[in-house]
Image (cartoon, grey):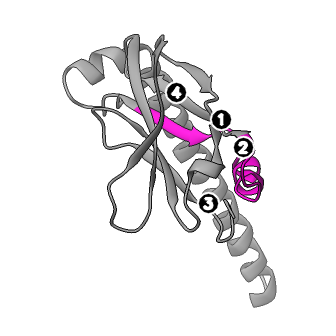
Amino acid sequence: MTLPSAQRDDVDRTSSSVDLRRHGYLVFGVVVTLLLLQWPFAGVLASVGFTPRPSHFTELAFENPTAVIAATQFAGVAQPIAFVVTNHEGIAKTYQWVEQSTLGSNRARTLATGRVAIRNDASAIITPVVSLSHVAPTSRVSIALVGTTQSISFSVAAGVGK
């Protein structure tokens, strides 16, 4: 006995969706198995160059960028402008930092300097207090880690220091 064509189509769709579902479960199972097998061997795979090695780096950022913007509005007042240094170099490291102001292409004027020792995967908040009255209007204040290419900066608003 043959089924009417509408019933045959329903049977075909049902069997193909079951096949797709089984295929999907099979692919999912293979992916999960490969991921689980890689986990215990991740160190071995990294040592022979099959996986990327972790990169070592240092982060430098303002602790609170909004406070930096507000600080540039107060002439003649000592302003704490905090920044954060985070060490991801793989070892403890001592950083030397310098805070400078520059007006146009003029030579930079040092406002503050310091050193900080930071263990690996740790951060230090540094808060030099600098009077913006010593900074010319429309100048740029930068903080740099000496011996690296890392720096952060902000512009002092026109009218500061009048």
Mark drawn on residue 94:
none
Residue under the point 64% across and 71% down: 158
- Measuring from the top left, give residue 83's x and y in whole percent: 60, 35
- Measuring from the top left, give residue 44's x and y in whole percent: 28, 15
Q: Which quadrant of the figure has residue 78? A: top right
Mark 2: give few (<14), some (14-19) or many (20+) Cα within 10 Å: few
Q: What's the CA distance linking mark 4 and mark 3? A: 49 Å
Residue linked to disc 2: 64
Q: Indicate the secondary structure of the residue bearing disc 1.
A: loop
Give the label, 4 or 2, closer to the camera: 2
Residue 74 is inside the magenta segment: yes
Residue linked to disc 4: 86
Residue linked to disc 1: 82
User: Does 152 sit above or below residue 124?
Assistant: below
Q: What's the CA distance linking mark 3 and mark 1? A: 57 Å
Q: Indicate the secondary structure of the residue bearing disc 2.
A: loop
Q: Indicate the secondary structure of the residue bearing disc 4.
A: strand
Mark 3: give few (<14), some (14-19) or many (20+) Cα within 10 Å: few
Q: Nearer the viewer, residue 66 or 123?
A: 66
